Image (cartoon, rainbow, N blue to C red):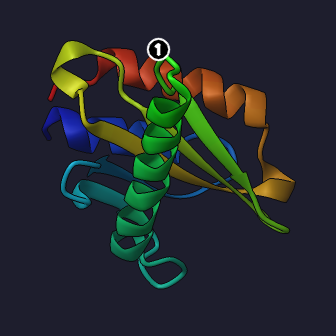
Amino acid sequence: MNSVDIALKETLEIGGALGAALVDFTSGMTLGTAGNPHSLDLEIAAAGNTEVIRAKLRTMESLGLQDTIEDILITLGRQYHLIRLLQSHSGRGLFIYLVLDKSRSNLALARHRLRSIEGQLDV
């Protein structure tokens, strides 16, 4: 099992996790997915969330913000969609996408676990 598979497996162990993907936001392509493919098309979600990141980066550039995106949270009625950009040198251009069941998850703990998983990921 490679580092991506291990990271996605650990991501799915986060309380309330429904699906996860490791995505290259320069291309919108997934490097791996985990979860129930019948409940959520992670390939389509990855491509769509790539556009969210690109839009935020353009906005930051327009505002002259010299900063980085740590994560982006999208709160839906029944789910959290968490986008965690990898900050390591080898992870530039990548993000972990995590879908959580809102009623069964702890958002603070999920963010903490994603930081930890990111630190162990070698891509």
- Does residue 34 sit above or below 24 in this rendering? below
Residue 28 coordinates in the image, percent (x, y): 26, 60
Residue to which mark 1 is pinned? 66
Residue pictured at 45% horizontal, 47% vertical: 53
* Numbered disc 1: secondary structure: loop
In the rendered view, would you say 113 is above or below 57? Answer: above
Side (left or right) of 37 relative to 28? right
Relative vertical location of residue 16 with respect to residue 117 in this rendering, above or below: below
Check disc 1 and give the amino acid type: Gln
Percent from the top left, x then y, of residue 17? 60, 52
Residue furthest out toward the bottom:
38
Rate crowding at label 1 as few (under 14), some (14 to 19) or many (20 or more) other CA atoms within 10 Å. few
| Residue at image point 54% right, 80% down | 39
52 and 85: which is toward the camera: 52
Q: Where is residue 56 in the image (x, y as percent from the top left)?
A: 51, 43
Residue 115 coordinates in the image, percent (x, y) = 50, 20
The residue at the point 46 percent across, 20 percent down is 68
**Viewer-side residue, 50 vs 98:** 50
Q: Please tell me which residue lies in front, 95 or 26.
A: 26
Is 123 on the left-hand or right-hand side of 87? Answer: left
User: Residue drawn at (75%, 36%), measured in percent from left and top?
Assistant: 107
Q: Nearer the viewer, residue 96 or 63?
A: 63
**Residue 41, located in which quarter of the rendered image?**
bottom left
Screen quadrant of the C terminus: top left
